[in-house]
Every structure is written in structure tokens, then in C-alpha cells.
Image (cartoon, rainbow, N blue to C red):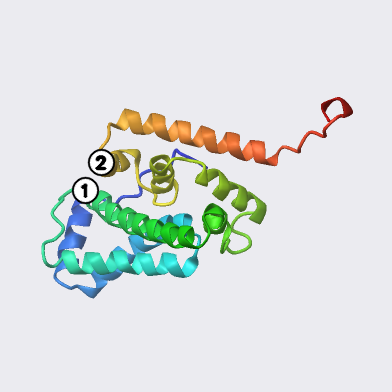
């Protein structure tokens, strides 16, 4: 994972004009908004849900919320559109994950993490399947808040400043937490790939 990604946000004036046009129902503006943000929202949802269809459904749900709130003035955090949009996305994903966990736990608590982490891997060529499985298991070992920071940064593509605004915490604290979470991910994945040491006769 690289954490030096530049902020992909469009200029403020450009975004403000785009949102104003979209709020008036301009199809071209809506198409531009979807092209700018759908892939990132989908990546965030897919990273948590591990399922293409669910991620697409959640992405569509986020844009349905935007289509409902923007013309009606429901979006009122001027100058922080991306943080607002990804707060909607993160809440939608969090609600889905919570419902899924309750459903799985009601069936068999022991299969909760294994099923949720391992199902529906990404298409071949995107990442080695073994590495992908290791990453998902390692991610499941993070706290909910640390996992959210990693996913907003590396799947959602938000800047650290935007994530700090979204989560309402100091930028320095967020940076330190992101660094610790990445270090834990690397350590966990390294431990998973190390071959097991054979048991000697003295240890039996």
C-alpha cells in the first residue's frame, strides 16, 4: 500500500459549479459526479463487503441519497463535499456489515469472520489470490476504527485532512493511527507467510 497518494479532489470552484448544476438536474453534471466518485465508493464498499453485487448496490444507494438530498438542499456542508459523501458511504457500508454480522452470528458465530473475509475474491490479475486472502484476514484483525481509516485512505482515496474531518479527530492523531494500522497489517501478513517451524523431539 502506498500512503503518499495526492488528493484527487477537483478544485473547489469546479466542484461547487458541478454540484450547483447537478442540483438543477443537469444530466451531464450527474454523469460527471458519478464518474468522479463511483469507482472510489465502490472500492470502499467492496473492501468491506467482499462482494461485487453488494458493493454495487451500496454504491447506487449512496448516489440515490445524493440525488435525493442535493436538489432539496439536504447537503449543507459547503466546501466539504467529499467528506460528506464518504460519510454517507461509510455509514451505509457500516450498517450493511453490522446487519451481515448479526445474520451470520444468528446462524453460527464461529463462521462469522471466515465467511465475511474470504468470500468472493477479486478477479484474477488484480492481486494474487493468496495475498488477497492474507490481506483480508489481516484487515479483520484491526479495530473497526483503524480499518475504516485504512479503507477511506486506500480504497476511498480521501486525503488525510478529509478523513480527519469525516471522523472528527485531529490530523496528527489520525496520521499516527494510520501509521500504526499499516505497521500491524504488515506484521500480521509477514507472520502469516512465514513457514511454520518444525517441532523438535525435545519440544514434544
Q: Position of residue 125 (x, y in %)?
A: 63, 60
Q: Position of residue 109 (x, y in %)?
A: 51, 55
Q: Is residue 32 visible?
A: no
The residue shown at (43%, 67%) is: 54
SS class, disc 1 = loop
The residue shown at (15%, 63%) is: 20
SS class, disc 2 = helix
Spatial CA distance of label 1 from label 2 is 8 Å
- Tell me if label 1 and label 2 are in contact, CB under 8 Å: yes
State the residue in front, 114 or 26.
Answer: 114
User: Which of the numbered marks, if any, corresponds to residue 80?
Assistant: 1
CA neighbours of label 1 inside 10 A, class few (<14), some (14 to 19), many (20+) = some
Instruction: Choose top left, top right, bottom left or bottom right for residue 30.
Output: bottom left
State the residue in front, 98 or 94.
Answer: 98
In the figure, is residue 85 to the left or right of 105?
Answer: left
Q: Earlier in the sequence, mark 1 or mark 2?
A: 1
Instruction: Choose top left, top right, bottom left or bottom right for residue 37.
Output: bottom left
The residue shown at (16%, 58%) is: 75
Q: Position of residue 80 (x, y in %)?
A: 21, 48
**Residue linked to disc 2:** 165
The residue shown at (34%, 29%) is: 173
Amino acid at each position: 500500500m502506498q500512503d503518499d497518494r495526492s488528493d484527487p479532489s477537483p478544485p473547489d470552484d469546479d466542484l461547487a459549479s458541478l454540484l450547483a448544476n447537478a442540483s438543477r438536474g443537469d444530466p451531464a453534471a450527474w454523469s460527471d459526479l458519478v464518474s468522479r466518485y463511483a469507482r472510489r465508493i465502490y472500492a470502499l464498499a467492496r473492501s468491506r463487503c467482499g462482494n461485487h453485487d453488494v458493493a454495487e448496490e451500496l454504491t447506487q444507494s449512496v448516489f440515490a441519497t445524493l440525488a435525493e438530498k442535493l436538489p432539496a438542499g439536504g447537503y449543507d456542508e459547503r466546501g466539504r463535499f467529499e467528506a460528506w459523501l464518504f460519510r454517507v458511504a461509510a455509514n451505509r457500508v457500516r450498517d450493511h456489515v453490522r446487519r451481515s454480522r448479526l445474520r451470520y452470528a444468528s446462524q453460527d458465530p464461529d463462521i462469522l469472520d471466515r465467511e465475511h473475509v474470504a468470500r468472493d475474491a477479486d478477479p484474477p490479475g488484480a492481486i494474487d489470490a493468496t495475498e488477497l486472502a492474507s490481506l483480508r484476514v489481516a484487515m479483520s484483525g484491526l479495530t473497526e476504527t483503524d480499518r475504516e481509516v485504512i479503507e477511506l485512505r486506500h480504497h476511498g482515496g480521501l486525503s488525510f485532512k478529509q478523513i480527519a474531518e469525516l471522523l472528527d479527530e485531529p490530523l496528527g492523531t489520525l496520521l499516527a493511527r494510520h501509521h500504526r494500522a499499516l505497521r500491524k497489517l504488515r506484521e500480521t501478513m509477514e507472520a502469516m507467510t512465514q513457514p511454520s517451524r518444525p517441532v523438535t523431539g525435545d519440544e514434544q
